[in-house]
Amino acid sequence: MNLTNFGLAKRFRDFSVMAGLLFCLAVNDAPAQLTIEIIGGGANQIPVTILPFAGEERFTQRASQIVSADLQRSGMFRLGSVGSVRPFPVEPAEINYRYWRNEGAETLVIGSVVEKADGYAEVRFRLMDVAKQSQILGFSYTVTVAQLRVTAHKIADLIYEKLTGDTGVFATKICFVTKNADRFELQVADADGYNPEFILAHKEPIISPQWSPDGTRIAYVSFERRKPIVFVHNLLDGTRTVLANFEGSNSAPSWSPDGRKLAVVLTKDGSSNIYTINADGSGLARLTNSQAIDTEPSYSRDGRYVLFTSDRAGSPQIYRMRADGEGEAERMTFEGGYNVTPRHSPDGKSFIFIHRNEARFNVAVIDLASRQMQILTGGSLDQSPTFAPNGKMILYASEVKGRGILAAVSSDGRIKQRFTAQSGDIREPAWGPLLNNRRKEQ
Amino acid sequence: MRNVLFVAFLVFLIAGCATQGGKSADIEQRDLFDQQQAQRQQEAARKQETEKQAQVMREQDELKRQLEEQQRRQQGQVPQQEQPIVRPLPDGTVGESQLKSDPWAQLKEAESPLSKRSVYYDYNAYDIKEEYVPLIEAHAKLLMAHPDLKIIVQGNCDDRGSREYNLALGQRRADSVKRAMVLLGVNEKQTETVSFGAEKPVAFGQDEESWAKNRRSDIVYPREPQ
């Protein structure tokens, strides 16, 4: 279940006849849909100097530039000058450490890309400590040319992890919904907005996509049958099944951490209540039983709790209940008259939600230990927040001049990014999980 | 060739593992891409693509069919001559009252409250305002007089806040209209409700005027002739 490979398999490049990624490097002939803009940066940026990889210019995907773009976009790094010495060093023995020390470099990334037979290439990179004149990291990958891009993301992940101590999420996927005229598309793209592919297109709305914990399926709500119905889409074979199509409204899917069942919201018994259902559509069980609106369930990562939105006290507020339905639900938000869309953080220590702040709707976070609330964003209409799998960034939908865009903010509110499409609206983002083989390393 | 490469890759890997223990090895081999899996996924993707193409073809066929049907209708090509045209002749005595009893005609009368089909709400509210009671009563009366008539009440919201919460709120709005009608004596089976949440706005501005237009329940008669 290598998450990165399904992107490689399906290509709808012709569909995305959009502009190249404007952000810093116009290296790619491949069309990309999203443009990323960075606003602000971390307080203490880590210096790193990334030199061009020998031979990379023969490929459309230039590894070192992708690595640089990833690290810069995170807001955590300050990229050093590539200096004036040519050719660039490729092997450790070729590095003039005194020169790079004078250039202000603390860590240096060198590498090469060598074409192999049958459409394969070998990518080598080393992360060098300039002061100690020693190697911190070094890896070689033999991959297909089509995998060069994701390989560069993996290299960026390794550098990020080594230098920050946190898990990198450059090699993950995101999904979102685009609206162009009367066409809605559910799209999957790399975390940097590259390689967008639609997995579903319809003239009726699509909302609330949610990744399964293993990244192989996406649950979403489609109005294609003139009412909201929950589907589960298998990304590996492109098939999909109806998860919930009961009388009334079916919506707000949230996967349990083991991926075996989902919480959904149904109105079949009257008002909106939360139910659980197995991923194959069997075994429906009721979780909440109120006359009020109960919606937007979100499982905690340990599967013990469900956060949800309810107007049982008059205004919509966030509540937390045990996932087995036992006991009373606990109210979690008290500031303001409109708190909706709760999402547990990956480490379980906090949750994010949308808070109405005067006339604005913004992403806010509440620390579960202190119960302190912090507003993280400042848009007029921010919606649908979703955590990166390392918990460091939050992707959300926002609006600029009446157009839907995606934006991201670091969980401390310092670093901000903005993703815009060439045309139309983007909304309903969901950040996919880490690759299986990397999750074990955590 | 693929196989040869794969074997070569394996050998490469094993060699990599072997040198990993040695201190001299500063480059490590990592197997990131299982080629068999890549192949399997490529096949799945190919399958999916053909399915997608088939789907596009189906959609195109359907569009073509609809277009042809429309053209036929416009050109009057529907094979009418084979079927006798039977038309009841008005006898002059029941004409006016007959018109009254025709629900479709009543719905079209401009002065009738039945010509109005939308109930509007305050922000984040689903209670029916006084001014919309006559409208709901009129539709309830029509439904009671014509037990075969059916309506769908469609609940809508402005696009602020959460899409999912708005979906639930829209359902509440539609349900409130239905409940009022049932209380007035309408058979529950004649009314269906659906929420479109904030997904089907009729006004697109980011101002109160637009928002107010979108906070709405629409009463729709699915079989009403256009």
Image (tube, rainbow, N blue to C red):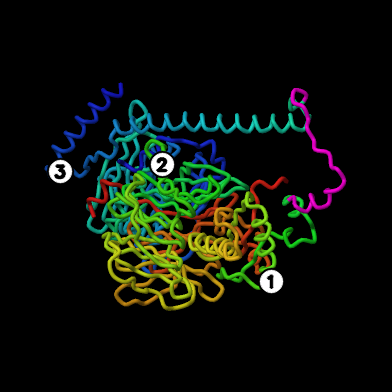
> Counting other residues with Cα less than 10 Å from the Cα at mark 3, is it few (<14), some (14-19), or many (20 or more)?
few
Which residue is more in the foreground, A127 or B137?
B137
Image-quadrant location for residue A292: bottom left
Q: Please tell me which of labels 1 and 3 falls first in the chain.
A: 3
The percent coordinates of residue B47 (x first, y second) are 42, 29
Marks 1 and 3 close (CB-CB < 8 Å): no
Q: Position of residue A158 (x, y in %)?
A: 29, 51
For disc 1, the marked residue is B131
Front position in the image: B32 or A346: A346
Identify which residue, A274 or A256, lies in the foreground.
A274
Q: Which mark is residue B24?
A: 3
- Up-down relation of residue A377 to residue B46 (above or below): below
Picture disc at residue A241 = 2
Q: Secondary structure at mark 2?
A: strand
- Give amino acid for label 2: Thr
Element assignment for label 3:
loop
Compared to residue A36, the image places residue A327 above or below, namely below
SS at mark 1? helix
Q: Which residues are magenta?
A: B81-102
The percent coordinates of residue A83 (x first, y second) are 40, 52
